[in-house]
Image: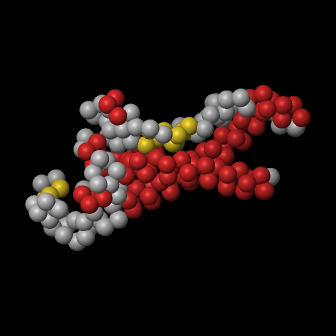
Amino acid sequence: MSLPGDQVSVKVVPRTRALVPLKGLESKIKYVAGKSRFTYEQILAYIQGIMNETLELTIKEVEVWIDEFVPKRSGDLRESLKKFLNKSKPPPTTVGELRNVRLILGAGADVKYAKYVIEMTDAMVQHEATWFEHSGKRAYSKGERVLLDDPNARGKFFEMMGPYGIERLRMNLTKIKWVRMKSA
């Protein structure tokens, strides 16, 4: 996963995604369908079910990570990241509709100041029960004085969130495949 860098628009901060394509597996799925009582479409639907479950679980885990490590200040950045993350969920399908199997985990934010926050260091974002910034100025959020209490915040969090999301995606896919195969 990489950040688009200079390609960032003014309205949206870096976007990134992890994609698990099924390229090259079509012939294998067709082979399995030919040897089993299930049709190609049923096998694809089963695989998509596994991927949807994996994505839902991963999104929940990344949301917990966001709550723990993303600087909170007003909470807008965290909420924007979670909203963007939830856009990864595929739209519900209607009965009989079959789409290409996909698993995409997207990350980004729609708050303008996010591009500055992702470049800050740990020292710039971590605060422990104080009304003042590290610079000595009073802390404000949306015009109101705020108590800064965010000792677990991480600077350059976006660089850590991507690899964490990919690792959880892989772990959850393995776990859900194993559980589903065991119960089948």
Horizontal side, residue 162 vs residue 12: left or right: right
Number of labels in the image equals 0
Residue 120's x, y, as percent? 27, 51
> Residue lying farthest left?
137
Residue 147's x, y, as percent? 19, 67
Horizontal side, residue 92 vs residue 34: left or right: left
Judge whether 36 appears above or below 61 on screen: above
Horizontal side, residue 49 vs residue 168: left or right: right
Residue 149's x, y, as percent? 26, 68
Horizontal side, residue 99 vs residue 132: left or right: right
Does any portion of residue 111 appear in the rendered image?
Answer: no
Residue in front for this viewpoint, 117 or 31 = 117
Residue 81's x, y, as percent? 38, 47
> Residue lying farthest right?
35
Judge whether 159 appears above or below 26 on screen: below
Q: Residue at x 67, y 51 (%)?
A: 174
Q: Residue at x 11, y 63 (%)?
A: 136
Q: Residue at x 44, y 55 (%)?
A: 63
Does any portion of residue 12 appear in the rendered image?
Answer: yes
Instruction: Tell me the quarter of the picture where residue 179 sits.
Output: bottom right
Residue in front for this viewpoint, 16 or 83 = 16
> Residue lying farthest bottom?
129
- Applied colour scheme: secondary structure
Instruction: Tell me the quarter of the picture where residue 25 sits.
Output: top right
Q: Residue at x 87, y 38 (%)?
A: 37
